[in-house]
Amino acid sequence: MTFRAITATLTLRTALHVGTGKDTETTDDLLRRDARGRLLIPGTAIAGALRSIATRLAPRFDSEPPCQALKGEQPNKACQCLVCQLFGDVNPQEDNEEAVAARVLVYDAVLDTAPSLTIRDGVGIDRVTGAAARRERIKFDYEALPAGTTFKLRLEIDSRLSNEQRTLPLLAAALAEWEQGRGAVGGRVGRGLGAFSLSDVQWIERDLMQPDTLIEFLRNGPPWHAADGDHNWLTANVKTARGFIRPYSDTLPVARSWVLAEFTLAATGPFLTHDPTQAGRGGFDHAPVLTAYDQNARPVLPGSSLRGALRSQAERIARTLATLKAWDNGKDTASRKAAFLTLCPACNPLTTKTDDPVASCNSFIKALPKAKRDELEQEGAEEKLCLACQLFGSSWNGSRLRVEDAPFVGEKVERKVLDFLAIDRFTGGGRDTAKFDAVVLWKPKFRARLFLENPAPWELGWLALVLRDLHDGLITVGFGAAKGFGRCNIEDWKITFGFLVDEDFPLPGNDDQDPVAQQAVAARQRLLDAQRGTSGVFQTLAFNQATAEDWLVLAEGWVKAFNTQVTGHQHAFGLKKDSYFDEIDGKWLPDLYPARVS
């Protein structure tokens, strides 16, 4: 009998929230704790995140069938794929002897120390006013662990694990994604939380048939703190996994590619993302979000704040293109309105009724009969969602885009205290009881990180346009946009693409008659011939100035693909109302403010 295990150090790159669903007077959602009150990441959460990666990677192994979970099937038989051999059968049956239990045992990652916790606040943004949504009352908060907290990752490998020449390389390939910094665990990962990296990965093995080893094991327990393990195990097995990777032509959502955008977001003036708890502690009305509640804590830009600003601008771009198409194709305002309601590519996710202007996809799906909703829960609702919900996510479809918390960069944090006073519209003087103050950051810089899995060409084009607007100062982030706060530009940016095989690299199109598509194919091939690296089981391409012309060719194709996607989109339900194509007191707004002026 042999004891085999994998240990590693899990270090949070951003704050973490693994919730309980329970609230107190302090917060709406508490962190998970064990019976002794110690903070922890449940083994189920770690195993779930690891299994999710392995499920998407396994079909890329030569001749390996995809897991039933990936296909949405629930047949009355065991799956027996590589993933189910590692983590337990996804469809266990009591009368089926072929199904197996998990052969990789994932332990809770428990904190023996008590780090400084924070309370994060969230608020929805009104798509019309650009301010905090008031009618929908989208306000909430939750408890979070700070970035930099470390946990001990502990995996035990059962001796009954089968097909180890493939299952262990698959496990290593999934762990390598975490080692390369592409891991996330817990709640709200799309909004910046739960990002982490692995380090000090080692394989530990003990022969319990040796009397001395067995006695030591029984006396001291499993050797979780041993340092004499095989530190090359991960590298060797990832190399083996790369040899199994093959092209994949099916449409299932398997691992194909990813894109990572890293840049410094530099504010050009005052900047503030409001933290009510921090403001209350300091005696101000408004104060910035910090990594912890102590004197030396540094500011952080929550991923939710940046993500919300990016999504709002993305929706505005898409709806503008759809408005222009409806305007050009219609003969009068009524026909233009009908055309827009049919092809609107971006909903307002905060609305709750189907007759609201630009009603949310969620409101339409919730209005469906229960049988149809159950079917969408089982098979997926992506085809019923607008383009914005497909990219940024909705309550019916998780997002493949992660916008992480952005840490402050620089040596010195410069703060300013500003006072504000509302003006009485009747007297022209200061309004009583309408004075407030704020501690703002002055020209701070944050290191932002965006990660998109399996990007489609139109998604890349859309994000390129949004990031261009962010750099040009057309997007404000955080509090006080009307007061001149939150204007930024982008510095020191880096774009990296990962792909398993050359065919997985996202191309704008494959039309032999389209010169843009053909130029993109040639540009990709020149990039592949000139430079490529590796990251885990993925090959990588990174932007550099020497190959800028080829990257610009690809970007042009991606933007064209986005324009084609928007103008060809059809709303799954058909909107009932829009805030622009609207009639008020017998007058159409488009007649007062035409989309095109000749």
Image (cartoon, helix red, strand yellow):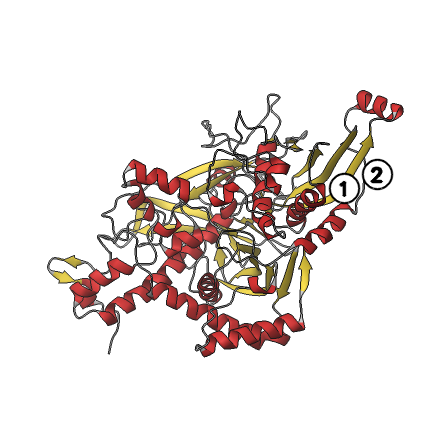
Mark 1 — residue? 202
Q: Residues within 10 Å of mark 2 (few under 14, many from 20)?
A: few
**Which residue is outermost to the left?**
586
Q: Amino acid at mark 2?
A: Asp
Can the viewer see residue 41? Answer: no
Residue 39 occupies quadrant: top right
- Residue lying furthest right: 212
Residue for point 47% across, 48% down: 304
Residue 75 lies left or right of residue 340; in this view the side is: right
Q: Where is residue 385 shown, x and y percent of the image?
A: 36, 51
Residue 224 position (above or below residue 62): above
Q: 402 or 160: which is nearer to us?
A: 160
Image location of residue 176, percent across then percent down: 67, 49
Determine whether the residue tagged by mark 1 lies in a helix, strand or loop.
Answer: strand
Coordinates of residue 133 in the picture (x, y in percent): 34, 46
- Give the secondary structure at mark 2: loop
Q: Is residue 233 visible?
A: yes
- Quadrant location of the C terminus? bottom left
Please give the label number shown on residue 321: none
Residue assigned mark 2: 228
Please tell me how crowded label 1 is: few (under 14), some (14-19), or many (20+) other residues with Cα within 10 Å: many
Of the 4 image quadrants, the one containing the N terminus is top right
Residue type of the residue flagged with mark 1: Gln
Of residues 172 and 136, the one nearer the viewer is 172
Q: Earlier in the sequence, mark 1 or mark 2?
A: 1
Query: Is 241 or 432 nearer to us in this picture?
Result: 241
Say how many tags the image has: 2
